[in-house]
Protein backbone atom coordinates (compact mmCIF):
# COMPACT_ATOMS: atom_id res chain seq x y z
CA UNK A 1 0.00 0.00 0.00
CA UNK A 2 1.59 3.29 -1.16
CA UNK A 3 1.86 6.21 1.20
CA UNK A 4 -0.10 9.35 0.54
CA UNK A 5 2.04 12.36 -0.34
CA UNK A 6 2.64 14.61 2.64
CA UNK A 7 1.82 18.27 2.07
CA UNK A 8 2.95 20.70 4.72
CA UNK A 9 0.42 23.37 5.69
CA UNK A 10 3.25 25.93 5.38
CA UNK A 11 3.73 25.12 1.67
CA UNK A 12 2.06 27.57 -0.70
CA UNK A 13 2.39 28.93 -4.20
CA UNK A 14 3.25 32.64 -4.09
CA UNK A 15 2.90 34.60 -7.34
CA UNK A 16 6.09 36.48 -8.31
CA UNK A 17 6.24 39.84 -9.99
CA UNK A 18 7.47 39.80 -13.56
CA UNK A 19 10.52 42.04 -13.95
CA UNK A 20 10.83 43.98 -17.18
CA UNK A 21 13.85 45.92 -18.40
CA UNK A 22 13.25 49.61 -17.93
CA UNK A 23 14.38 51.52 -20.99
CA UNK A 24 15.78 54.98 -20.30
CA UNK A 25 13.58 57.92 -21.11
CA UNK A 26 14.43 59.53 -24.47
CA UNK A 27 16.48 62.66 -23.88
CA UNK A 28 16.27 65.90 -25.83
CA UNK A 29 19.75 66.94 -27.01
CA UNK A 30 21.07 70.49 -27.40
CA UNK A 31 23.74 70.32 -30.12
CA UNK A 32 26.08 73.15 -31.12
CA UNK A 33 28.06 73.23 -34.40
CA UNK A 34 30.79 75.91 -34.40
CA UNK A 35 32.48 77.49 -37.42
CA UNK A 36 35.98 75.99 -37.76
CA UNK A 37 38.93 78.37 -37.72
CA UNK A 38 41.63 75.70 -38.11
CA UNK A 39 43.93 75.98 -41.13
CA UNK A 40 42.47 74.32 -44.27
CA UNK A 41 39.45 72.89 -42.41
CA UNK A 42 36.45 73.22 -44.73
CA UNK A 43 34.35 70.33 -43.42
CA UNK A 44 31.27 70.54 -41.21
CA UNK A 45 30.29 67.57 -38.98
CA UNK A 46 26.51 67.61 -39.61
CA UNK A 47 24.88 68.45 -42.93
CA UNK A 48 21.53 70.31 -43.15
CA UNK A 49 19.84 66.98 -44.01
CA UNK A 50 21.17 65.41 -40.78
CA UNK A 51 20.15 68.50 -38.79
CA UNK A 52 16.63 68.22 -40.22
CA UNK A 53 16.37 64.60 -39.01
CA UNK A 54 17.56 65.54 -35.51
CA UNK A 55 15.24 68.58 -35.26
CA UNK A 56 12.28 66.47 -36.38
CA UNK A 57 13.19 64.00 -33.61
CA UNK A 58 12.70 66.82 -31.10
CA UNK A 59 16.32 67.92 -30.61
CA UNK A 60 17.63 71.49 -30.55
CA UNK A 61 20.49 72.38 -32.94
CA UNK A 62 22.41 75.66 -33.01
CA UNK A 63 24.80 76.41 -35.89
CA UNK A 64 27.34 79.24 -35.85
CA UNK A 65 27.04 81.72 -38.72
CA UNK A 66 29.08 80.49 -41.70
CA UNK A 67 29.87 77.06 -40.20
CA UNK A 68 29.04 75.22 -43.42
CA UNK A 69 30.34 77.76 -45.96
CA UNK A 70 33.50 75.74 -46.70
CA UNK A 71 31.32 72.83 -47.86
CA UNK A 72 28.78 75.05 -49.68
CA UNK A 73 26.16 74.49 -46.97
CA UNK A 74 24.86 77.95 -46.14
CA UNK A 75 23.04 79.47 -43.16
CA UNK A 76 19.77 79.42 -45.13
CA UNK A 77 20.15 75.64 -45.63
CA UNK A 78 20.53 75.11 -41.88
CA UNK A 79 17.74 77.49 -40.87
CA UNK A 80 15.35 75.78 -43.31
CA UNK A 81 16.35 72.47 -41.70
CA UNK A 82 15.22 73.85 -38.32
CA UNK A 83 18.53 74.94 -36.80
CA UNK A 84 19.04 78.28 -35.04
CA UNK A 85 21.83 80.39 -36.57
CA UNK A 86 24.07 81.90 -33.85
CA UNK A 87 26.39 84.85 -34.54
CA UNK A 88 28.24 84.81 -31.20
CA UNK A 89 30.65 81.90 -30.64
CA UNK A 90 30.35 82.21 -26.83
CA UNK A 91 26.56 81.88 -27.18
CA UNK A 92 26.95 78.74 -29.29
CA UNK A 93 29.16 77.14 -26.62
CA UNK A 94 26.23 77.08 -24.20
CA UNK A 95 25.04 73.91 -26.01
CA UNK A 96 25.36 70.74 -23.93
CA UNK A 97 26.92 68.79 -26.83
CA UNK A 98 29.48 70.41 -29.14
CA UNK A 99 30.29 68.63 -32.42
CA UNK A 100 33.36 69.74 -34.40
CA UNK A 101 35.22 68.66 -37.53
CA UNK A 102 38.60 69.96 -36.27
CA UNK A 103 40.40 69.45 -32.92
CA UNK A 104 39.64 71.76 -29.98
CA UNK A 105 41.61 75.03 -30.21
CA UNK A 106 42.92 77.23 -27.36
CA UNK A 107 40.11 79.76 -27.89
CA UNK A 108 37.42 77.06 -27.87
CA UNK A 109 38.81 75.38 -24.73
CA UNK A 110 38.26 78.67 -22.87
CA UNK A 111 34.64 78.86 -24.10
CA UNK A 112 33.69 75.32 -23.01
CA UNK A 113 31.21 75.00 -20.14
CA UNK A 114 31.43 72.62 -17.17
CA UNK A 115 30.19 69.05 -17.82
CA UNK A 116 29.83 69.55 -21.59
CA UNK A 117 30.20 66.78 -24.18
CA UNK A 118 32.66 67.48 -27.03
CA UNK A 119 32.81 65.25 -30.12
CA UNK A 120 35.73 66.08 -32.42
CA UNK A 121 38.85 64.53 -33.98
CA UNK A 122 42.18 64.64 -32.15
CA UNK A 123 45.63 65.12 -33.66
CA UNK A 124 47.97 63.67 -31.03
CA UNK A 125 51.17 65.30 -32.44
CA UNK A 126 49.52 68.78 -32.23
CA UNK A 127 47.68 68.29 -28.92
CA UNK A 128 48.58 70.66 -26.06
CA UNK A 129 48.69 69.88 -22.33
CA UNK A 130 47.17 73.32 -21.57
CA UNK A 131 43.98 72.40 -23.45
CA UNK A 132 43.78 69.04 -21.64
CA UNK A 133 44.16 70.81 -18.27
CA UNK A 134 41.16 73.03 -19.08
CA UNK A 135 39.08 70.01 -20.14
CA UNK A 136 39.99 68.25 -16.88
CA UNK A 137 39.09 71.30 -14.76
CA UNK A 138 35.70 71.61 -16.51
CA UNK A 139 34.96 67.85 -16.18
CA UNK A 140 34.35 67.50 -19.91
CA UNK A 141 33.31 64.25 -21.62
CA UNK A 142 35.49 64.26 -24.77
CA UNK A 143 35.04 61.77 -27.62
CA UNK A 144 37.44 61.45 -30.56
CA UNK A 145 35.22 60.60 -33.53
CA UNK A 146 38.17 59.19 -35.48
CA UNK A 147 38.53 56.49 -32.78
CA UNK A 148 34.85 55.43 -32.73
CA UNK A 149 34.26 51.83 -33.85
CA UNK A 150 31.09 50.54 -35.50
CA UNK A 151 29.36 47.19 -34.95
CA UNK A 152 31.55 45.63 -37.68
CA UNK A 153 34.71 46.51 -35.72
CA UNK A 154 35.95 49.17 -38.18
CA UNK A 155 36.58 52.89 -37.71
CA UNK A 156 33.86 54.27 -40.02
CA UNK A 157 34.99 57.92 -40.20
CA UNK A 158 38.67 57.04 -40.65
CA UNK A 159 37.73 54.55 -43.36
CA UNK A 160 35.60 57.13 -45.20
CA UNK A 161 38.39 59.74 -45.09
CA UNK A 162 40.88 57.08 -46.28
CA UNK A 163 38.62 56.16 -49.22
CA UNK A 164 38.43 59.85 -50.16
CA UNK A 165 42.23 60.27 -49.86
CA UNK A 166 42.92 57.21 -52.03
CA UNK A 167 40.61 58.36 -54.83
CA UNK A 168 41.72 61.98 -54.60
CA UNK A 169 45.43 61.04 -54.74
CA UNK A 170 45.02 59.45 -58.19
CA UNK A 171 42.89 62.35 -59.49
CA UNK A 172 45.54 64.83 -58.26
CA UNK A 173 48.28 62.76 -59.93
CA UNK A 174 46.34 62.77 -63.21
CA UNK A 175 46.03 66.54 -62.97
CA UNK A 176 49.72 67.23 -62.29
CA UNK A 177 50.88 64.87 -65.05
CA UNK A 178 49.01 67.06 -67.55
CA UNK A 179 50.33 70.24 -69.18
CA UNK A 180 47.78 72.55 -67.52
CA UNK A 181 49.70 72.46 -64.22
CA UNK A 182 53.16 72.40 -65.82
CA UNK A 183 53.34 68.61 -65.95
CA UNK A 184 55.06 66.62 -68.69
CA UNK A 185 51.81 66.00 -70.61
CA UNK A 186 50.99 62.36 -69.82
CA UNK A 187 47.45 60.94 -69.83
CA UNK A 188 47.29 58.65 -66.80
CA UNK A 189 45.40 55.83 -68.49
CA UNK A 190 47.04 55.99 -71.91
CA UNK A 191 45.16 55.18 -75.14
CA UNK A 192 45.28 52.52 -77.85
CA UNK A 193 48.86 52.21 -79.04
CA UNK A 194 50.23 54.43 -76.23
CA UNK A 195 51.29 52.71 -72.99
CA UNK A 196 49.58 53.85 -69.76
CA UNK A 197 51.31 55.76 -66.97
CA UNK A 198 53.01 53.68 -64.27
CA UNK A 199 51.65 54.20 -60.76
CA UNK A 200 53.54 52.95 -57.70
CA UNK A 201 51.62 52.82 -54.40
CA UNK A 202 53.40 52.42 -51.05
CA UNK A 203 50.94 51.00 -48.52
CA UNK A 204 48.15 48.44 -48.98
CA UNK A 205 45.65 49.77 -46.44
CA UNK A 206 42.33 51.44 -47.28
CA UNK A 207 44.06 54.47 -48.88
CA UNK A 208 46.26 52.19 -51.00
CA UNK A 209 43.31 50.01 -51.99
CA UNK A 210 41.16 52.91 -53.20
CA UNK A 211 44.13 54.55 -54.94
CA UNK A 212 44.73 51.24 -56.76
CA UNK A 213 41.03 50.97 -57.69
CA UNK A 214 41.00 54.51 -59.10
CA UNK A 215 44.29 54.08 -61.00
CA UNK A 216 43.24 50.73 -62.47
CA UNK A 217 39.84 52.18 -63.37
CA UNK A 218 41.57 54.92 -65.38
CA UNK A 219 43.70 52.30 -67.12
CA UNK A 220 47.06 52.91 -65.41
CA UNK A 221 49.66 50.23 -64.69
CA UNK A 222 49.77 49.72 -60.89
CA UNK A 223 52.43 48.32 -58.53
CA UNK A 224 51.87 48.10 -54.77
CA UNK A 225 54.40 47.82 -51.91
CA UNK A 226 53.68 46.96 -48.26
CA UNK A 227 55.44 45.00 -45.52
CA UNK A 228 52.26 43.11 -44.58
CA UNK A 229 51.63 40.08 -46.79
CA UNK A 230 48.11 39.88 -45.32
CA UNK A 231 47.30 43.45 -46.45
CA UNK A 232 48.69 42.76 -49.94
CA UNK A 233 46.58 39.59 -50.22
CA UNK A 234 43.48 41.38 -48.93
CA UNK A 235 43.96 44.25 -51.40
CA UNK A 236 44.24 41.86 -54.35
CA UNK A 237 41.12 39.99 -53.22
CA UNK A 238 39.17 43.23 -52.71
CA UNK A 239 40.02 44.81 -56.07
CA UNK A 240 39.44 41.47 -57.81
CA UNK A 241 42.41 41.59 -60.17
CA UNK A 242 46.03 40.47 -60.13
CA UNK A 243 48.62 43.23 -60.00
CA UNK A 244 52.28 43.61 -59.06
CA UNK A 245 52.77 43.43 -55.27
CA UNK A 246 55.98 43.39 -53.24
CA UNK A 247 57.29 43.75 -49.71
CA UNK A 248 59.17 46.98 -48.95
CA UNK A 249 62.60 45.85 -50.15
CA UNK A 250 64.71 49.04 -50.66
CA UNK A 251 66.51 47.72 -53.76
CA UNK A 252 63.28 46.66 -55.56
CA UNK A 253 61.53 49.87 -54.44
CA UNK A 254 64.38 52.05 -55.76
CA UNK A 255 64.37 50.24 -59.13
CA UNK A 256 60.61 50.58 -59.56
CA UNK A 257 60.64 54.27 -58.54
CA UNK A 258 63.10 55.04 -61.37
CA UNK A 259 60.48 53.89 -63.88
CA UNK A 260 57.34 55.27 -62.14
CA UNK A 261 55.34 58.25 -63.42
CA UNK A 262 53.41 58.54 -60.14
CA UNK A 263 54.40 57.50 -56.59
CA UNK A 264 51.69 57.56 -53.90
CA UNK A 265 52.70 57.30 -50.23
CA UNK A 266 49.91 55.72 -48.17
CA UNK A 267 51.74 53.98 -45.32
CA UNK A 268 50.14 53.45 -41.92
CA UNK A 269 51.83 55.32 -39.03
CA UNK A 270 53.89 53.44 -36.47
CA UNK A 271 53.41 54.87 -32.94
CA UNK A 272 51.77 57.92 -34.51
CA UNK A 273 54.54 58.68 -37.03
CA UNK A 274 54.85 57.44 -40.62
CA UNK A 275 58.19 55.74 -41.32
CA UNK A 276 60.28 57.31 -44.11
CA UNK A 277 60.86 54.55 -46.70
CA UNK A 278 61.80 56.63 -49.78
CA UNK A 279 65.15 58.36 -49.38
CA UNK A 280 66.22 61.62 -51.01
CA UNK A 281 68.53 59.68 -53.33
CA UNK A 282 65.61 57.50 -54.54
CA UNK A 283 63.64 60.66 -55.37
CA UNK A 284 66.65 62.18 -57.16
CA UNK A 285 66.79 59.09 -59.41
CA UNK A 286 63.10 59.39 -60.45
CA UNK A 287 62.14 60.62 -63.91
CA UNK A 288 61.85 64.38 -64.43
CA UNK A 289 58.21 65.44 -64.40
CA UNK A 290 57.03 62.45 -62.35
CA UNK A 291 54.60 63.12 -59.49
CA UNK A 292 54.76 62.25 -55.77
CA UNK A 293 51.48 62.32 -53.77
CA UNK A 294 52.34 61.92 -50.07
CA UNK A 295 48.99 61.04 -48.44
CA UNK A 296 50.85 60.19 -45.19
CA UNK A 297 51.84 63.85 -44.74
CA UNK A 298 49.54 64.42 -41.74
CA UNK A 299 51.71 61.93 -39.81
CA UNK A 300 55.09 63.07 -41.11
CA UNK A 301 55.17 61.62 -44.65
CA UNK A 302 57.00 58.60 -46.06
CA UNK A 303 59.20 60.47 -48.60
CA UNK A 304 62.34 62.12 -47.25
CA UNK A 305 61.86 65.09 -49.60
CA UNK A 306 58.27 65.82 -48.50
CA UNK A 307 57.30 69.05 -46.76
CA UNK A 308 53.81 70.29 -45.85
CA UNK A 309 51.92 72.21 -48.55
CA UNK A 310 48.45 73.79 -48.58
CA UNK A 311 45.33 73.59 -50.76
CA UNK A 312 46.16 77.13 -51.96
CA UNK A 313 49.68 76.14 -53.05
CA UNK A 314 49.62 72.32 -53.09
CA UNK A 315 52.83 71.46 -54.96
CA UNK A 316 56.55 72.15 -55.13
CA UNK A 317 59.37 70.72 -57.25
CA UNK A 318 62.53 69.00 -56.04
CA UNK A 319 64.91 67.16 -58.39
CA UNK A 320 62.36 68.04 -61.13
CA UNK A 321 59.82 65.80 -59.36
CA UNK A 322 56.44 67.39 -58.54
CA UNK A 323 55.55 66.89 -54.84
CA UNK A 324 51.92 67.12 -53.60
CA UNK A 325 52.02 67.08 -49.77
CA UNK A 326 48.71 68.50 -48.49
CA UNK A 327 48.04 66.99 -45.02
CA UNK A 328 44.24 67.32 -44.88
CA UNK A 329 43.33 65.92 -48.31
CA UNK A 330 39.66 65.31 -47.43
CA UNK A 331 39.12 69.07 -47.00
CA UNK A 332 39.80 69.44 -50.72
CA UNK A 333 36.46 67.71 -51.33
CA UNK A 334 34.82 69.03 -48.19
CA UNK A 335 31.20 68.50 -49.19
CA UNK A 336 31.73 64.77 -49.80
CA UNK A 337 33.80 64.50 -46.60
CA UNK A 338 31.16 66.37 -44.57
CA UNK A 339 28.43 64.00 -45.76
CA UNK A 340 30.60 61.00 -44.86
CA UNK A 341 31.18 62.31 -41.30
CA UNK A 342 27.54 63.32 -40.90
CA UNK A 343 26.35 59.85 -41.99
CA UNK A 344 28.19 58.37 -38.99
CA UNK A 345 27.50 61.04 -36.34
CA UNK A 346 23.77 61.61 -36.96
CA UNK A 347 22.71 58.00 -36.13
CA UNK A 348 25.01 58.10 -33.06
CA UNK A 349 23.18 61.22 -31.82
CA UNK A 350 19.83 59.48 -32.36
CA UNK A 351 21.00 56.41 -30.42
CA UNK A 352 22.36 58.63 -27.64
CA UNK A 353 18.96 60.30 -27.25
CA UNK A 354 17.19 56.91 -27.15
CA UNK A 355 19.60 55.71 -24.43
CA UNK A 356 19.09 58.74 -22.19
CA UNK A 357 21.96 60.92 -23.45
CA UNK A 358 25.62 60.64 -24.42
CA UNK A 359 26.48 58.99 -21.10
CA UNK A 360 23.90 56.30 -21.88
CA UNK A 361 25.42 55.44 -25.26
CA UNK A 362 28.93 55.38 -23.75
CA UNK A 363 27.67 52.86 -21.20
CA UNK A 364 25.83 50.74 -23.78
CA UNK A 365 28.14 50.78 -26.84
CA UNK A 366 31.72 49.50 -26.59
CA UNK A 367 32.52 51.06 -30.00
CA UNK A 368 31.68 54.54 -28.67
CA UNK A 369 33.76 53.90 -25.53
CA UNK A 370 36.77 53.37 -27.82
CA UNK A 371 36.58 57.06 -28.74
CA UNK A 372 36.28 58.46 -25.19
CA UNK A 373 39.62 60.00 -24.18
CA UNK A 374 38.27 62.04 -21.27
CA UNK A 375 35.32 61.30 -18.98
CA UNK A 376 34.21 63.95 -16.49
CA UNK A 377 37.72 65.22 -15.97
CA UNK A 378 39.55 61.87 -15.99
CA UNK A 379 41.93 60.96 -18.86
CA UNK A 380 40.75 57.58 -20.16
CA UNK A 381 43.21 57.20 -23.05
CA UNK A 382 46.53 55.62 -22.02
CA UNK A 383 48.73 57.05 -24.86
CA UNK A 384 47.49 60.62 -24.17
CA UNK A 385 48.02 60.22 -20.41
CA UNK A 386 51.55 58.87 -21.00
CA UNK A 387 52.48 61.58 -23.49
CA UNK A 388 51.52 64.47 -21.20
CA UNK A 389 52.23 62.88 -17.82
CA UNK A 390 48.62 62.85 -16.60
CA UNK A 391 47.02 60.17 -14.46
CA UNK A 392 45.29 57.46 -16.53
CA UNK A 393 41.92 56.06 -15.42
CA UNK A 394 40.36 52.98 -17.03
CA UNK A 395 36.95 54.01 -18.44
CA UNK A 396 35.27 50.66 -17.73
CA UNK A 397 36.30 50.85 -14.05
CA UNK A 398 35.13 54.45 -13.93
CA UNK A 399 31.71 53.56 -15.36
CA UNK A 400 31.40 50.56 -13.01
CA UNK A 401 32.14 52.70 -9.95
CA UNK A 402 29.59 55.34 -11.05
CA UNK A 403 26.79 52.87 -11.77
Image (cartoon, grey):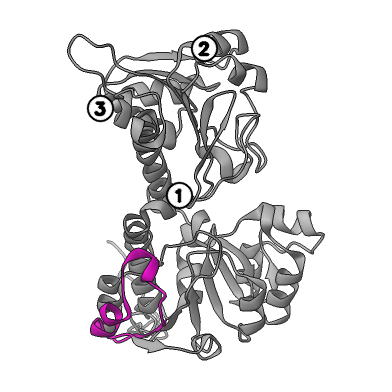
Picture disc at residue 158: 1
* SS of the residue under disc 1: helix
Nearer-the-camera pick, 368 or 53: 53
Instruction: Measure the C-alpha gap from mark 1 to mark 2.
Output: 32 Å
Instruction: Measure the C-alpha gap from mark 2 to mark 3.
Output: 22 Å
Nearer-the-camera pick, 286 or 61: 286
Task: Let me know if residue 78 is in the magenta part.
Answer: yes
Tag 3 residue:
218
- Residue at 71%, 75% in the rendered image: 136
- Local crowd size for mark 3, using a 10 Å CA cut-off: few (<14), some (14–19), many (≥20): some
- Residue 137 position by quadrant: bottom right
- Describe residue 268's horizontal placement relative to residue 12 as left or right: right
Quadrant for the N terminus in the image: bottom left
Tag 2 residue:
258
Where are the magenta residues, as a range?
Answer: 56-83
Instruction: Provide residue 86's location: percent of width, then percent of height.
Output: 43, 88
Instruction: Provide residue 10's location: percent of width, then percent of height.
Output: 42, 85
Instruction: Measure the C-alpha gap from mark 3 to mark 1.
Output: 25 Å
Amino acid sequence: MSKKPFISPSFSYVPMEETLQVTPKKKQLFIGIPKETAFQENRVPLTPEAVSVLVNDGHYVAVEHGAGDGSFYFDSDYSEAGARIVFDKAELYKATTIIKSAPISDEEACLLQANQVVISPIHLPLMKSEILEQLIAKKIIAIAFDSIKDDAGTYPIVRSMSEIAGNYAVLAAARYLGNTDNGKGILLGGISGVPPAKVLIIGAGVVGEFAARAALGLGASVKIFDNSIYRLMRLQNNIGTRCFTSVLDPVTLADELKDADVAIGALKPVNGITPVVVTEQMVANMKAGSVIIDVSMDRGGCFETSRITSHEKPTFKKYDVIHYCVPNIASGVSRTASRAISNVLMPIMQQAADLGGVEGIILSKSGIRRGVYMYKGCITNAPIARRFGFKYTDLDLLLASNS
